[in-house]
Image (cartoon, rainbow, N blue to C red):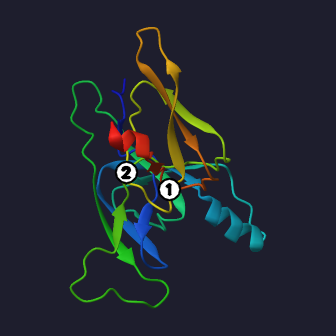
C-alpha cells in the first residue's frame, strides 16, 4: 500500500534564456514527470507535421538521464510515497542547462533558467472573460503597467455587506502569460 505521492511545484514552465533545455540525471530513486506541450511547441510541431498527444507521463529511475526543454513543456513532477513501514521514497536528481544552439553561458552568469512564481494562464483566455469573483482575490495587485492584462472591478456586495470583486481580462491572454492587474485610480485613493 503506497502512501500519497509527494508532488513538486504546481504545473509550470521555466524561463530559459537560450534555445536548448536541461538534462536531469536521476541519482537515486524515481521521479515521475507529468508533461503537456505549450501552445508554442504545438505550433512548431504542426509546422513539421508532427502530432502531439494532450499529455505525457514519463518516469525516470536511478541512472536515467532525461533531456527536456522546460520552457516548451508544462511540467509537474512527483515522487512516490513510502510503502508502509519503509523509507524507500528518497529521490535525488541533478539538473543542468544544455545549449543545443551553440551558445554558451556568459561567464559568471549562473542565472540561465528560473521558475516563474505567480498566477498564469494555462490556456488561452479571451478578452472579457471573468477570471475570478471573490471578496478578496488572492492575486496580488501591481502598480499600473502598460502591459497589464486584467482589471479589478467591484461587482456588488455579498450578504455580509462586503464588496464582491471580480478580475476581468481586458485583453486576450496567451497561454503562459502572467496575470497582471491594472489598478484603478479609485483604488489608489482608498
Q: Where in the figure is residue 186, as x and y percent of width and height?
A: 42, 40
Residue drawn 69% across and 58% down? 52
Percent from the top left, x then y, of residue 53?
68, 52
Mark 1 to mark 2 CA distance (whole Å): 9 Å
Image coordinates of residue 156 in percent, x first then y, are 52, 21
Left or right of 29? Residue 32 is: right
Q: Which one is earlier in the sequence, the residue at label 1 or at label 2? A: 2
In the image, which disc is placed on residue 142? Answer: 2
118 or 21, nearer to the observer: 118
The residue drawn where x is 36% and y is 52% is 117
Frontmost residue, 5 versus 11: 11
127 vs 3, left or right, is: right
Foreground pick, 48 / 15: 15
From this viewpoint, is residue 140 visible? no
Q: Please, is residue 132 above or below residue 148 in the view?
A: above
17 in relation to 132, above or below: below
C-beta proximity under 8 Å, tags 1 and 2: yes
* SS class, disc 1: loop
Image-quadrant location for residue 42 = bottom right
Marker disc for residue 148: 1
Inspect this view and state whether residue 158 appears: yes
Amino acid at each position: 500500500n503506497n502512501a500519497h505521492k509527494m508532488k513538486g511545484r504546481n504545473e509550470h514552465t521555466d524561463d530559459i534564456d537560450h534555445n536548448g533545455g536541461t538534462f536531469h540525471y536521476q541519482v537515486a530513486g524515481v521521479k515521475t514527470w507529468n508533461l503537456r506541450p505549450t501552445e508554442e511547441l504545438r505550433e512548431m510541431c504542426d509546422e513539421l507535421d508532427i502530432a502531439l498527444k494532450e499529455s505525457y507521463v514519463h518516469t525516470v529511475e536511478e541512472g536515467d538521464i532525461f533531456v527536456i526543454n522546460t520552457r516548451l513543456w508544462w511540467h509537474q513532477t512527483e515522487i512516490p510515497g513510502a510503502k508502509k513501514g519503509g523509507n524507500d521514497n528518497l529521490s535525488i536528481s541533478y539538473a543542468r542547462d544544455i545549449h543545443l544552439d551553440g551558445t554558451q553561458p556568459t561567464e559568471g552568469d549562473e542565472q540561465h533558467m528560473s521558475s516563474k512564481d505567480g498566477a498564469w494562464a494555462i490556456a488561452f483566455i479571451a478578452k472579457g472573460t471573468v477570471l475570478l469573483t471573490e471578496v478578496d482575490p488572492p492575486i496580488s495587485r501591481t502598480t499600473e503597467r502598460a502591459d497589464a492584462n486584467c482589471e479589478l472591478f467591484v461587482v456588488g456586495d455579498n450578504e455580509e455587506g462586503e464588496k464582491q470583486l471580480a478580475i476581468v481580462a481586458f485583453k486576450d491572454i496567451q497561454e503562459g502569460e502572467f496575470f497582471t492587474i491594472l489598478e484603478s485610480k479609485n483604488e489608489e485613493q482608498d
